[in-house]
Image (cartoon, rainbow, N blue to C red):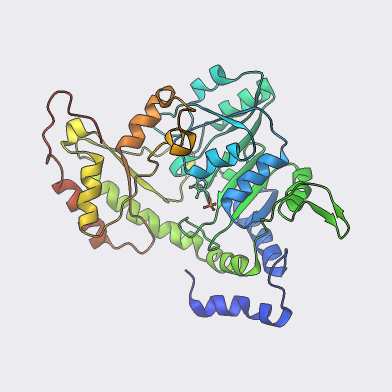
Amino acid sequence: MPPLEEYVEEIRELWESHMLTNMGVKHNELEKRLREYMGVKNVSLMVNGHLALELVIQAMGLSGEVITTPFTFASTTHAIVRNGLTPVFCDINSETYTIDVEKIEMLITDKTSAIIPVHVYGNICDIEKIDQLAKKYGLKVIYDAAHAFGESYKGLGVGNFGDASMFSFHATKVFNTIEGGVICFPEDELGLELYRLKNFGIRGPEKVDYVGSNAKMNEFQAAMGLCNLRYVDEEIAKRKSVYEHYLSRLRDVKGIRLMKQQENVEYNYAYFPVIFDEKIFGSTRNDVFDALEKENIFARKYFYPLTNTYDCFHGKYDVNATPIALYISQRVLTLPIFADLSVENVDKICDIILSSKGNRIFGAGQGESR
Ligand SMILES: *Cc1c(COP(=O)(O)O)cnc(C)c1O
């Protein structure tokens, strides 16, 4: 959060103008600053990341099937299903946890209209290969870039790839507007459609063109964003040093697999995922989770369960079609990481992890993660 006084200063003029929402001055200023910061051509702010995703899918007029991954937050799959589309789940790459581009092509049918991949933990999908497939089969590509704010790939802002990218500005993300989100897109025409879809499909006072939603970002959210944007580089730098301390403590531990950073990616250090191989580590991801929880440290099983195993989709999808995603989701823990996390606390977390090593002896057939 920014200093309180700074936020108060930022919202002071709202008391004078009484303009609280509907694409006001703060909203427009944040759009301008984000275009600059993210190095993208067009942006459309939304009340949250999820509705941003729902509306950009609607704006593209997709139909039939959409290829995506189950190793993601509920939002990605739900946005597809809530648009009346069928998600087709592709497995993930075991090193980057993003969509396995070698397995996309065999899932493409004559009903496929788009690919919605996720830049998981800020790892960037294989955009070159995805681009190539999209061109070959005439598919749209929308990136769920909720984890990738502030990142660049080969020196280019990550919001520049595909037909659109969604970034989330939820309170838990690297950059927040309390709740919020944005769509970045290269084609100008999409802007007008998004603008209308987030405002009930209204074209003019007496003309309603689309069955739109209400997803406008209000002025208080935008003011929070304007304040937080001033600190985001500093926040990322601090996260980086937390990340590196974790790395130095956990790098050489047998049975722990850490994320390998991609070349060409400037990271935002939003997540520190750890994969526990119970056979070598000698205890499970859940054992470590419980040991941390006992000390009031809340790591996240992120992403567990896979979206294709949710109760709301019972019987619809075959989890065995995505075995790597299943393996990772049963063994991953994302450790606490934020700018002000102290070295002492990182040490404490690592000490607890290391002391849970080998607490469980695995015999034949007992190696399953619960
Ligand atoms: C946070 C998140 C979203 C949803 O964003 P909200 O702003 O919370 O609606 C979507 N996808 C992923 C991968 C996320 O982490």
Quarter in which the C terminus is drawn = top left
Residue nearer the viewer, 41 or 353? 353
Residue nearer the viewer, 125 or 355? 355
Residue shown at 15%/36% (left/top)? 282
Q: Is residue 39 left or right of residue 275?
A: right
Q: Is residue 156 left or right of residue 58?
A: left
Q: Is residue 126 above or below residue 123?
A: above
Furthest toward the bottom, the residue is: 16
Q: Is residue 145 left or right of residue 113?
A: left
Can I make out residue 340 in this image? Answer: yes
Which quadrant would residue 34 be assigned to in this image? Answer: bottom right
Q: Is residue 238 left or right of residue 64?
A: left
Residue nearer the viewer, 289 or 82? 82
Which quadrant would residue 111 be assigned to in this image? Answer: top right
Residue 325, percent from left and from top: 40, 31
Can I make out residue 94 in this image? Answer: no
Residue 224, percent from left and from top: 56, 68
